[in-house]
Image (tube, rainbow, N blue to C red):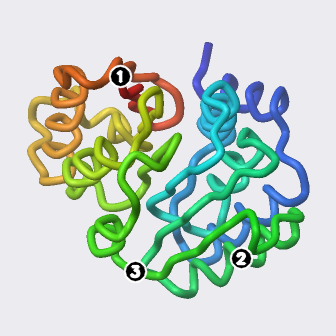
Amino acid sequence: MDSNALNGWLDSWLPEDVALTAARARSNEVGVACVDAVTGSALCLLAATNGAKSVVELGTGAGVSALWILRGMRADGVLTSVDPETEHQRLAKQSLVEAGYGSGRVRLIAGQALEVLPRLSDGAYDMVFCDALKTENGDYLTAALRLLKPGGLVAFAGALGDGRVADPGARDSETVALRELATRIRDEDQLTSALLPIGSGLLVGVRS
């Protein structure tokens, strides 16, 4: 089947509601990438399956992935979302409030991920979702192994780099970092992993 036709069918099968549509429009307005609906639904499913109460998100954007994750979390769960762009977080807050999520459900932290992560508590989180600088993914993984409870999961968006990871001629720093991350997660004794070929790739590991 033609990929465009398949994407159209998927969009019709899993239509986004008003809140998600508005958040996605805000992302487009400021030119920040966000997960597609299929990847978002997978994040929602992972959070629900995990019974996630405490989640860290790296890369807030305008709130698209946050909305998907929150919908899978427990009703008393709290999402901590980190992004260095204060304008992005302002837009995300608007998206979250419109969807009915107040400050008691979401903690927005403006700052660089590698500066914020050391301040978060060891073994306190059920899920860490990374959609920030791909070249820092290795450091995010190191932090996630410290932050996650046993049975917690870490997920990385864009893990296939729009297919570049399979191109041996692609040697840019981002693609190289994605390949190294995939190998490291696959070989990490503390993780049971899977690379899901949805969207631009979702790499997932569950901590033992």
Identify the mark at residue 111; answer none if there is no mark.
3
Identify the mark at residue 93; answer none if there is no mark.
2
Circle 2 residues within 10 Å: few <14, some 14–19, many ≥20: many
| Residue 27 against residue 39 in the figure, above or below | below
Q: Type of residue at label 3?
A: Gly
Q: Secondary structure at mark 2?
A: helix
Q: Nearer the viewer, mark 2 or mark 1?
A: 1
Residue 190 visible in image = yes
Sequence-first disc among 2 and 1: 2
Name which quarter of the figure residue 87 lies in: bottom right
Q: Residue at x 34, y 34 (%)?
A: 160
Q: Position of residue 23 (x, y in %)?
A: 74, 65
Q: Residue at x 30, y 24 (%)?
A: 191
Q: Nearer the viewer, mark 1 or mark 3?
A: 1
Residue to which mark 1 is pinned:
208
Mark 2–mark 3 Cα distance, whole angstroms, equals 15 Å
| Residue 48 against residue 193 in the figure, above or below | below
Circle 3 residues within 10 Å: few <14, some 14–19, many ≥20: some
Q: Type of residue at label 2?
A: Lys
**In-image side of 43 versus 9 (left or right):** left
Q: Type of residue at label 1?
A: Ser
Q: Residue at x 70, y 72 (%)?
A: 26
Q: Position of residue 82 (x, y in %)?
A: 48, 69
Which residue is most to the top? 1
Q: Secondary structure at mark 1?
A: loop
Q: Position of residue 115 (x, y in %)?
A: 28, 75
